[in-house]
């Protein structure tokens, strides 16, 4: 497991002759095995943060480091779960999950063992030979998550992974992800605009300001969660009923509202 | 693939194209005249081609100078093409507009279509000999089919609301054709014309290769017999050049004829 | 107005009338005695000649042997076009410098009609199989290259990014992402390619061959036997249709499997 460090990160985009600052003075650390969610208004640059950690984008100022090494290009040590799933439509579920393992040079027996493990874990039994277009959105995202987890990556990067799913499926996936995260803690950077989701899943929440995006506030959820024993309740709706949950959620909402208020459209 | 940053302008692209061509010429020269990797008997060096071009332009080769050959071929193709596609377009439009005409003409079409234009050359020679008449026949066949098919689809793909509007506005007869059918089918018609022109040009070169007195294809034929690789290359490049220019001209006409289209 | 569809009765009547008109006029012209029967045979004469060619050798071989010869050349040229075209297109789509280098070369060569390569083909290969194969290659190559290139270039970015985050290098990305994603485009290109290749074959065989259907037609023309020439034309047309239909079936099968 590794940590993610954003060290004085700045991202400036050049467009049509002019430039605009997307991200400014981003300093934050995702500690080992910590689940950090970034929330913020649209366009605040939260996805850009994730992409820089993934190596799909590069800061114009400062550095992003994973496990002490500066990120320059994408790789299986920083596995990504995309909002649009990005499963290869021409490969079966099994082959999709196997794809990254082949890059890592894992031998056949070990590959089989790992893939079978995650297929069982993500409830994909029986679908090994299916193609993505035959699966529902929720199932596809399970495959995408399995594909990332199976690599045993240093860090996991998730870009609004449940954004393309319908409300009911979303809830089910959140419960499953919580189960997964609590049983096998990994370093996770989770991007979302859904506050409920962030409060439910994360150890800490980073609230970003609107563009130019900076870190507005970092909220510790874990302490509250453990003190109030949220994980004792298996169902999400029960957790969301708890006063401690509501209090945190409202706090985050208020922070975001302040941002929206200043928006000029 | 890296994310590109920075602007691309015309000069940038033009620069790289020119650079690529220059590199190509250098490699060509090196491979042939420079190192002798490729024997001159098999593939000509750039300078040889240049001198062959000069020869044919100034003194002439195989019964004529370069521009005379070009003119002959281009004229033949243009005449055949215009003749053939005019009939083809009209027929195609008629077939598109009238189901009766379509039903009647279609079987004839289904039989003709699979036969490649070049396959008509022996037949044309049997019936019309080795002269220009045979060439015109073959060009006719080559240019005919794409024009008909594309004009037909051009009419068929006009959206229903346009027809309903025409009915409401009581457009009929000649006006119907001139202001609804033809403009609606124009883009398809021009696609057909482009294909017809390509087919006509290819077919003519082939026909001239087999037997002609003058023309670009004939240059190729003569140069092959004389084992004159540099002249063969001159012929090929001329074929490419004329083909390209004619396509350009057609595109220019298309732009004038369909000003309403977004490009 | 786009007229309503004809009733089946009407439709078949007109279709039959069209066929009748075509063959009727033809037969009448042939029988009228304007010219000799060898110069203008009746449709029936052509059919008879076609059958005759299937059993009686002409210029060395029976009809299906000629056809086999032609198909062999076509197959080789087409295969070559595919084996060179697809990898090259993938490289061009992925590596910008390859694109810059190859594109201008390709654009110039592309405008040279395949048939214009006959002189060089004759020079380099004589009447060997290399000549027609070269010309077929020149005809079949551009559509394969262009369609593969287009298909690969238009791959959704997310698949490429997913592959990169999963550790795929250039080779794996080209073969496991670009290539599969481009398959629908490639298959469409193959159909066009096959058509052009088959046409180019005919042209080539008219000049640089010693067997094959094109050669059969040339010899038929030399003997002023229209029926022979027409038999060749029918055979060429029929095989052309067969090739296209097979590829269309393959295209449909692939699309069904991918659930497009």
Image (tube, rainbow, N blue to C red):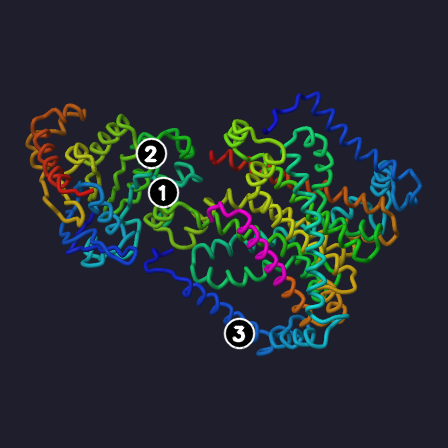
Q: Quick one: SS at disc 2?
A: helix
Q: In the displayed structure, would residue A212 be above or below residue B34?
A: above
Q: Quick one: SS at disc 1?
A: helix
Same chain for mark 1 and mark 2? The answer is yes
Residue located at (27% from left, 25% from top)? A168
- Which residues are the magenta region? B240-263
Marking on residue A111: 1
- Residue B154, quarter of picture: top right
Residue located at (27% from left, 34% from top)? A162
* Chain of the residue under the numbered disc 1 shown in the image: A
Q: In the displayed structure, would residue B28 be above or below residue B174?
A: below
Q: In the displayed structure, would residue B27 be above or below residue C164?
A: below
Q: Is residue C49 magenta?
A: no
Q: Is residue B242 magenta?
A: yes
Look at mark 3 in the image and give the residue it sits on: B26
Look at mark 2 in the image and give the residue it sits on: A119
Answer with left or right where residue B66 lies relative to residue A207: right
Residue C204 seen in this snapshot: yes
* Chain of the residue under the numbered disc 3 shown in the image: B
* Chain of the residue under the numbered disc 2 shown in the image: A
Q: Residue furthest bottom?
A: B34
Answer with left or right where residue B87 lies relative to residue A120: right
Q: Earlier in the sequence, mark 1 or mark 2?
A: 1
């Amino acid at each position: 497991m590794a940590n993610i460090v954003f060290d004085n990160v700045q991202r400036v985009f050049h467009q049509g002759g002019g430039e605009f600052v997307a991200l400014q003075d981003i300093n934050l650390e995702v500690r080992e095995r910590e689940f950090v969610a970034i929330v913020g208004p649209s366009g605040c640059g939260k996805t850009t943060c994730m992409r820089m950690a993934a190596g799909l984008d590069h800061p114009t100022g400062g550095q992003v480091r994973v496990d002490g090494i500066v990120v320059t290009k994408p790789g299986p040590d920083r596995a990504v779960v995309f909002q649009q799933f990005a499963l290869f439509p021409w490969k079966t579920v099994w082959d999709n999950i196997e794809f990254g393992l082949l890059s890592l040079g894992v031998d056949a027996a070990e590959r089989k063992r790992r893939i079978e493990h995650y297929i069982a874990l993500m409830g994909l039994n029986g679908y090994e030979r299916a193609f993505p277009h035959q699966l529902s959105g929720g199932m596809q995202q399970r495959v995408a998550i399995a594909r990332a987890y199976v690599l045993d990556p240093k860090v996991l990067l998730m870009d609004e992974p449940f954004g393309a799913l319908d409300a009911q499926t979303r809830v089910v996936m959140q419960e499953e992800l919580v189960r997964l995260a609590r049983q096998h803690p990994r370093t996770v950077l989770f991007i979302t605009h859904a506050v409920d989701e962030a409060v439910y899943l994360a150890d800490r929440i980073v609230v970003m300001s609107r563009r130019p995006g900076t870190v507005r506030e970092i909220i510790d959820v874990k302490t509250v969660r453990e003190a109030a024993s949220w994980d004792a309740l298996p169902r999400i709706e029960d957790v969301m009923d708890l006063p401690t949950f509501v209090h945190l959620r409202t706090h985050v909402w208020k922070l975001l509202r302040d941002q929206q208020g200043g928006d000029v459209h | 693939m890296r994310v590109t940053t920075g602007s691309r302008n015309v000069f940038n692209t033009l620069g790289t194209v020119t650079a690529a061509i220059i590199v190509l010429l250098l490699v060509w020269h090196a491979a042939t005249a420079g190192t002798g990797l490729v024997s001159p008997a098999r593939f000509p060096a750039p300078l040889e081609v240049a001198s062959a071009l000069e020869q044919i332009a100034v003194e002439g080769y195989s019964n004529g100078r370069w521009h005379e050959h070009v003119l002959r071929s281009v004229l033949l193709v243009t005449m055949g093409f215009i003749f053939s596609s005019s009939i083809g377009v009209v027929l195609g439009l008629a077939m598109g507009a009238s189901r009766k005409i379509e039903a009647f003409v279609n079987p004839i079409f289904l039989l003709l279509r699979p036969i490649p234009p070049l396959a008509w050359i022996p037949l044309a020679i049997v019936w019309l000999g080795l002269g220009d008449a045979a060439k015109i026949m073959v060009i006719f066949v080559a240019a005919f089919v794409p024009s008909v098919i594309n004009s037909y689809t051009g009419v068929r793909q006009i959206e229903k609301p346009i027809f309903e509007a025409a009915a409401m506005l009581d457009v009929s007869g000649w006006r119907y054709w001139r202001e609804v059918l033809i403009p609606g089918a124009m883009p398809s018609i021009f696609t057909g014309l482009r294909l017809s022109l390509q087919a006509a040009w290819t077919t003519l070169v082939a026909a001239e290769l087999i037997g002609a007195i003058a023309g670009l294809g004939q240059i190729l034929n003569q140069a092959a017999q004389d084992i004159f690789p540099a002249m063969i290359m001159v012929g090929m490049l001329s074929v490419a050049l004329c083909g390209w220019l004619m396509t350009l001209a057609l595109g220019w006409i298309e732009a004038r004829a369909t000003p309403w289209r977004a490009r | 107005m786009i007229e309503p569809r004809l009733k089946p009765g009407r439709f078949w009547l007109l279709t039959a009338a069209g066929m009748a008109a075509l063959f009727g006029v033809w037969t009448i012209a042939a029988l009228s005695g304007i010219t000799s029967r060898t110069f203008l045979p009746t449709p029936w004469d052509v059919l008879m000649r076609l059958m005759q060619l299937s059993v009686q050798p002409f210029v060395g071989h029976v009809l299906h042997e000629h056809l086999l010869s032609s198909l062999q050349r076509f197959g080789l040229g087409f295969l070559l076009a595919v084996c060179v075209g697809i990898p090259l297109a993938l490289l061009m789509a992925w590596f910008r410098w390859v694109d810059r280098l190859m594109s201008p070369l390709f654009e110039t060569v592309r405008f040279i009609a395949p048939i214009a390569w006959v002189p060089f083909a004759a020079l380099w290969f004589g009447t060997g199989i290399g000549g027609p194969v070269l010309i077929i290659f020149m005809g079949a190559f551009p559509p394969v290259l262009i369609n593969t290139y287009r298909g690969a270039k238009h791959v959704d970015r997310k698949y490429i990014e997913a592959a990169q985050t999963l550790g795929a290098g250039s080779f794996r990305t080209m073969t496991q992402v670009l290539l599969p994603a481009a398959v629908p485009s490639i298959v469409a290109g193959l159909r066009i390619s096959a058509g052009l290749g088959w046409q180019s074959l005919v042209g080539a065989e008219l000049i640089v061959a010693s067997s094959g259907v094109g050669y059969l037609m040339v010899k038929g023309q030399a003997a002023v036997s229209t029926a022979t020439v027409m038999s060749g034309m029918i055979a060429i047309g029929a095989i052309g249709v067969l090739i296209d239909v097979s590829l269309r079936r393959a295209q449909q099968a692939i699309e069904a499997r991918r659930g497009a």
